[in-house]
């Protein structure tokens, strides 16, 4: 799902640009956002790191082999096939995201510190599993 970008994200991800391909380089300031502590790969249901009216994220520090059964923070919104924005706030690892469970059909990779505020096309609403490289 999508919503309009907002002042909140402009404050914390100054200078971020919308990806046109796989992932996009974000400034160092994007290392951690509300709802996404350092060390985690986080996804949000809506664009620019929102899930409805808050910043609740689905996150992992190692991997999620099947997003089914995972939710955006404490919301009731399921995290499988619904993510529209993503941040790799990990410490060193690139993360790999897949359209299917258990690493099936790679969508893209996202280096540490990078974000994509607006997944689109086949990448949007399609993530079902994700792994940091160490566990991939
Ligand atoms: Ca999928």
Image (spheres, grey):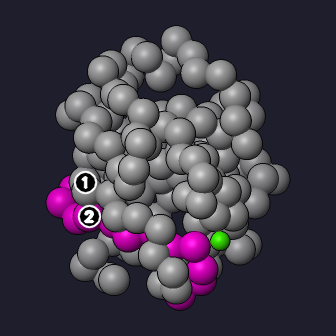
Residue drawn at x 26%, y 46% is 113
Q: Position of residue 72 (x, y in %)?
A: 66, 52
Q: On screen, 54 above or below 128?
A: above
Question: How many numbered dots are placed on residues in this image?
Answer: 2
Q: Which residue, given by chain and number where applicable, does mark 2 sit on?
A: 94
The chief SS type of the magenta part is loop
Q: What element does badge 2 sit on?
A: loop
Residue at 75% over, 60% down:
78
* Residue 131 percent location from the top left of the image: 40, 74
Left or right: residue 117 versus residue 95 is right
Task: Indicate yes or no: mark 1 CB to ligand 1 under 8 Å.
Answer: no
Give the quadrant of the C terminus. bottom left
Mark before the other along the chain sequence, 2 or 1: 2
Quadrant where the image shows the N terminus: top right
Q: Nearer the viewer, residue 26 or 28?
A: 26
- Label 2 with label 1: CB-CB less than 8 Å: yes
Q: In the image, which residues are magenta?
A: 91-102
- Ligand 1 quarter of the rendering: bottom right
Q: Is residue 19 left or right of residue 99?
A: left
Find residue 98 and name its label. none
Residue 3 picture location, percent across and down? 69, 28
Circle on res. 112: 1
Residue sitting nearer the eye, 31 or 3: 3
Rendered location of residue 101, percent (x, y): 59, 83
Q: Give me the residue at 42% from left, 33% from top.
A: 18
């Amino acid at each position: 799902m999508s919503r309009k970008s907002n002042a909140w994200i402009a404050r914390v991800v100054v200078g971020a640009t919308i990806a046109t391909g796989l992932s996009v380089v974000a400034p160092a300031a994007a290392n951690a956002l509300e709802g996404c502590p350092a060390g985690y790969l986080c996804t949000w249901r809506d664009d620019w790191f929102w899930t409805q009216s808050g910043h609740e994220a689905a996150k992992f520090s190692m991997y999620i082999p099947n997003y089914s059964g995972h939710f955006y923070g404490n919301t009731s919104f399921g995290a499988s096939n619904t993510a529209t924005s993503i941040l790799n706030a990990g410490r060193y690892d690139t993360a790999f995201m897949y359209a299917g469970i258990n690493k099936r059909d790679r969508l893209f990779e996202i280096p540490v510190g990078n974000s994509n505020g607006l997944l689109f096309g086949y990448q949007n609403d399609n993530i079902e599993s994700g792994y940091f490289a160490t566990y991939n």
